[in-house]
Image (spheres, rainbow, N blue to C red):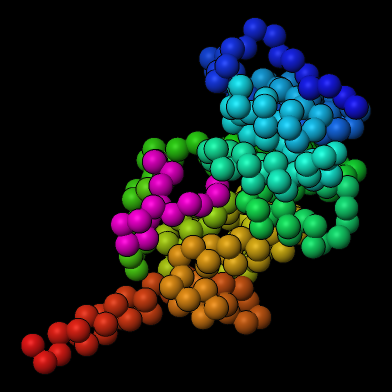
Amino acid sequence: MQQPYESPGAGPAQRGSAGTTRVLVVDDDPTVAEVVSGYLDRAGYDVDRAGDGPSALARAAAHWPDLVVLDLMLPGMDGLEVCRRMRGHGPVPVIMLTARGDEDDRILGLEVGADDYVTKPFSPRELVLRVESVLRRTRPAIAARVVHTAGLTVDPAARRATKNGTELALTIREFDLLAFFLRNPGHAYSREELMREVWGWDFGDLSTVTVHVRRLRGKVEDDPASPRLIQTVWGVGYRFEAAAAETDADTSTDTSTEGR
């Protein structure tokens, strides 16, 4: 089994050197890990490596990464569990690698919070582009304004979202999707349009959008089984309907004051 790559000169809890972005590559196939690391290194990233789940968690604890490229099928502890445990310690973007062609396996990765996935065999250049896309969306949008509607508030500069004053635990893509919906209420978007506008891709598996919408509904809807905010537009896609939620709130207020 491949031993974890030791990056020289890095102390506990340190990030990469000034001006660099640290990427942790986790794969038990030495060839895949070497190729991916080589491409990322040439793209200017500070690359760390691990060959199994426990080693990945140890490397992340010692040198918290800015992004993780994580193989789904790992010995001892699979990528899904590694992703869960890392997310338990703090937010970190994750791109899942999978050799499986089954859509259910890809969706599982998205369900535990992976921001993207790439199916093996893949183009290393494409993976670098995916890494750049995910990282670009983690950087604060300083000029973007705070958006507030239907009890939801999104602060792009702080990368913070709240519902009725309570902070929401959102992944990077969930945050971007919510921010997009709040900025564009009442407009129906197809999954292709959402993938282009939110993910920045002109290609990809549209189930990625479906899974993220379902996860987001679970965090922002009062009743995710009967969504009022993120509504399905049959034959088209999805629409954020802030007006319906605000009408519900007004009705609730009126009812509570009856008889006073």
Residue 158 included in the magenta stretch of the image: yes
Q: Which percent across, then down, holds residue 7?
A: 71, 14
Instruction: Mark yes or no: residue 130 visible.
Output: no
Residue 142: quadrant of the picture: top left
* Residue under the image location 55 percent in, 38 percent down: 89
Residue 112 appears left or right of 177: right
Instruction: Mark yes or no: residue 100 visible.
Output: yes
Asked whether 9 or 43 is in front, the reply is: 9
User: Which quarter of the image is occupied by the N terminus?
Assistant: top right
From this viewpoint, which residue is outermost toward the top?
9
Residue 183 appears left or right of 108: left
Q: Which percent across, then down, holds residue 20?
A: 59, 20
Q: Which percent across, then down, holds residue 250?
A: 25, 80
Q: Is residue 215 above or below residue 44?
A: below
From this viewpoint, which residue is outermost toward the left?
260
Residue 124: quadrant of the picture: top right
Residue 191 appears left or right of 1: left
User: Which quarter of the image is occupied by the C terminus?
Assistant: bottom left
Total number of numbered discs in the rendering? 0
Q: Is residue 41 above or below residue 160?
A: above
Residue 8: quadrant of the picture: top right
Q: Is residue 227 above or below residue 139?
A: below
* Residue under the image location 72 percent in, 48 percent down: 80
Instruction: Give the magenta part as a residue range.
Output: 157-172
* Residue under the image location 37 percent in, 60 percent down: 163
Q: Which percent across, then down, holds residue 195?
A: 64, 58
Residue 12 included in the magenta stretch of the image: no
